[in-house]
Image (cartoon, rainbow, N blue to C red):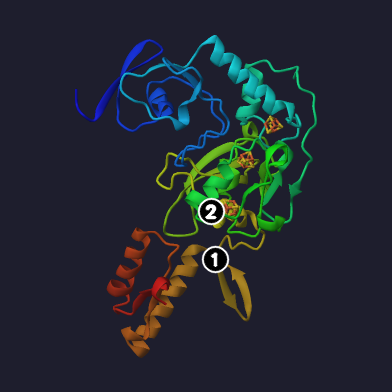
Amino acid sequence: MDGKKIVLSINGKEITCGLNKTILDVVRENGIQIPTLCDCKNLAPFGACRLCLVEIEGIPKLITACSTIAVKGMKIRTESERIDKSRRFIVELLLSDHPFDCMFCEQAGTCPLQDLAYEYGMKNIRFPGEKRATITDDTNPFIERDNSKCILCGRCVRVCDEIQGVGAIGFIDRGFQTRIGTPFDRNLDCEFCGQCVASCPVGALTAKPSKQKGRIWQTRSVKTICPYCGCGCNLTLHVRDNKIISVTSDPDTLNEGYLCSKGRFGCDYVHHPDRLQYPLIKKDGQFIRSSWEQALTLVAMKFKEIKEQHGNDSLAGLSSAKCTNEENYLFQKFIRAVLGTNNVDHCARL
Ligand code: SF4
Ligand code: SF4
Ligand code: SF4
């Protein structure tokens, strides 16, 4: 056996896998589903939700698959009556302190907690105790937080810290009072990248610009590239009635689902009434609508006039970081080969 591989068994079946992988990774690689709420791609294991509990032969208690490294010879069970009972109990405890707001919640339809409640048929919760107070933060234009729906999975805190390197939010208080918030409970004032919203499995964090604009099944998805900069992040536009109502990014793309605030929240300019949608030519102090052919002919004529009167080097071109590499290449080619000058630069060096 290759020293970089180990053999273990899952549900009685012999499996060969790589070293230093968590049980959850190995289980998933082999097409076995385990429910999770706190696990999130690229974030360090946290073991908060306890839903990924598995049995390991020789270990009396159930073990979290997300935070346990698979080792040689392990005999793992992902399904048993004991595991099922334990998972149901965890979901029931989460729901015992949950507002059951699915009719109005923005996450309805894509909420794994809602799915688990459905799967386990959790209609009657046995623990009708105290519920946490609703503490919301609605003080900024982008993100609304409703702690009554928070399941304390820590995904928002970890993505903000581990991926964004910002650390704008954290766990506040302890025990039943634990909640997510900002230092000293100040209003959220961060980069507004929206990564926390994208990571939140439930409806505790909502992107305000898309609130009540449409359910996920009422929208059509359009994959595109962010129009803002040359990084070229992948976007998925969620479109309803021909209007972009929200923007997400697929974790399996090059930017791994991460966006900046412009990509995530800035695409509404597409529908702005002031947006230029056709060329305008100024005549007698007034902008007059024209065709592309008229506009480009006029610009070409003006370039020609300047070149003839003042020489090629009287012209210069400045390109933009918003363009792709290919567009920048074409731009410099145009300036050098058509306008005949090397006066070409880029805003990044300005
Ligand atoms: S977070 Fe999920 S379970 Fe809770 S109200 Fe929203 S959709 Fe329902
Ligand atoms: S929007 Fe971005 S920077 Fe602000 S709290 Fe969320 S993850 Fe952190
Ligand atoms: S706000 Fe969402 S992501 Fe953050 S801890 Fe609560 S449930 Fe998890």
**Quadrant in which ligand 1 is drawn:** top right
Q: Position of residue 9 (x, y in %)?
A: 35, 15
Q: Quadrant of residue 184?
A: bottom right
330 or 319, nearer to the observer: 319
Question: 10 Å neighbourhood of mark 1: few (<14), some, or many (≥20)?
Answer: some
Q: Image point 46% across, 26% down: which residue?
A: 65
Q: Position of residue 120 (x, y in %)?
A: 64, 16
Q: Image point 32% across, 83% down: which residue?
A: 312
Question: 10 Å neighbourhood of mark 2: few (<14), some, or many (≥20)?
Answer: many
Q: Quadrant of the image for the C terminus? A: bottom left
Q: Amino acid at mark 2?
A: Gly
Q: Is residue 161 above or below residue 238?
A: below
Question: Can residue 241 be seen in the rendering of this structure?
Answer: yes
Q: Quadrant of the image for the N terminus? A: top left
Pointer 1 residue: 279
**SS of the residue at dot 1?**
loop
Q: Amino acid at mark 1?
A: Pro
Q: Which numbered disc flags the more N-terminal residue, 2 or 1?
A: 2
Left or right for 40, reference 185: left
Q: Position of residue 296 (x, y in %)?
A: 45, 68
57 or 194, nearer to the observer: 57
Pointer 2 residue: 263
